[in-house]
Image: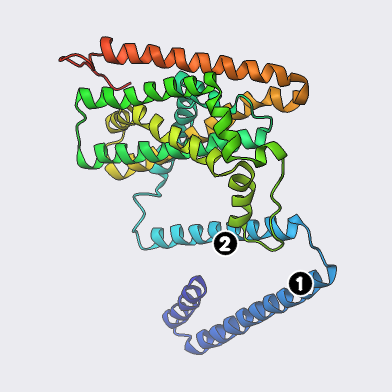
Amino acid sequence: MFRRRTALVVLLSAFALHRVGLGFFLIVAFSVGLAAVLIGFGVSMVYARRFMTRLHIDGPLTRRWLPVVSSASITILGVMLAIQAFSTVHLGAHLFSKERIGPILFVTGLGLILGMRHSTDADHVVAISTIVSKQRSIRNAAVIGSVWGIGHTITIFIVGSLIILFGIEIPPRIGLSMEFCVAIMLVLLGALNLTGVMQKVTARFTPSALTHTKPVPAPGAPIAMSLYQNSVGRLGVYQCVRPLAIGLVHGLAGSAAVAFLVLSTIHDPVWATVYLVIFGVGTMIGMMCVTAVIALPMAYAGERLSAISRYLGVVSGMVSFGFGSFLVYQLGFVGGLFTSHPQWTPH
């Protein structure tokens, strides 16, 4: 499109100068030069393909990362062309103007930072510690944290979007009940850890965790399949479903507060919902860092701290059970969930 526009400018300029013959000559020369460049580029790609074939490079660099880099480059180029097209026809001038780029970047960065800060809330750390306290792999712990973040983001996005887009008001009793679900979940996680039921269920549904077998992706497998085998295949479906369910429940406690905070700052409903996604991504990144830090001592100590690992599981269970019981009392009696006059403020 850009080349056709340039040729049209040259032709119109020649017409304006009453040099029609020169204009046609310039157009022909322009077309020949463009064709020569395209032919040269195509021939170079053919010879580059033959050269790469002769090298017989069959490693993770060419099979896994080069397609990712190529896809990312094409995506970035497509986005740049789309932005240029929108700015040309003045469809996105109000969105990508210099006056709005700064606030957009600021809100994006703020959403990521606040999301990372939100992941360090006490109830989040206590709940996730009951899962990763015995993990000896930083990578597996980070995957568990990211799955928790996905579940948390899904709930926040759904509940927050209902509040932002449709103006749904949450009654105090419903709000207290949403937070009460988190308290019950903490009590349940603590009880399962203390009684050893969680360890037995984990061993029952993830036998590969005991044999330390690592799934090997098939040669030439797609990127999505390789990621699936390196995450779900390595941990097991149960080890991924459990943090996802915990994240879904945890999102109930903070979704209303996040939505009300966004409404008080961002008045555009579309951008407010986009901010919810950015906030969720920040929460996922923060929880990945938290779970990696929790698993860091066990990963480097190995078998030397196997006895301490059992005590850490007991301690995390006691903390989860105690903190959950405290929240049950706070929400049920102090907050008034069990009374006729509930009092609830999103926080």
Residue toward you, 334 or 49: 334
Task: Indicate the position of residue 225 as horizontal and vertical percent values.
Answer: 60, 56
Tell me if residue 240 can be seen. Answer: yes
Q: Secondary structure at mark 2?
A: helix
Q: Secondary structure at mark 1?
A: helix
Q: Where is mark 1, residue-wise?
A: 48
- Say whether disc 2 or disc 1 marks the residue closer to the N-terminus: 1
Task: Indicate the position of residue 167 as horizontal and vertical percent values.
Answer: 20, 37
- For the C terminus, the image quarter is top left
Q: Where is mark 2, residue-wise?
A: 74
Farthest residue toward the bottom? 21
Q: Is residue 277 above or below residue 57?
A: above
Name the disc covering residue 313, or none: none
Give the residue displayed 60% in from the left and 24% down from the top.
Answer: 133
Say what amino acid the circle numbered 1 marks. Answer: Ala
Labels 2 and 1 touching (C-beta < 8 A): no
Residue toward you, 148 or 90: 148
Give the residue displayed 50% in from the left and 70% down from the top.
Answer: 2
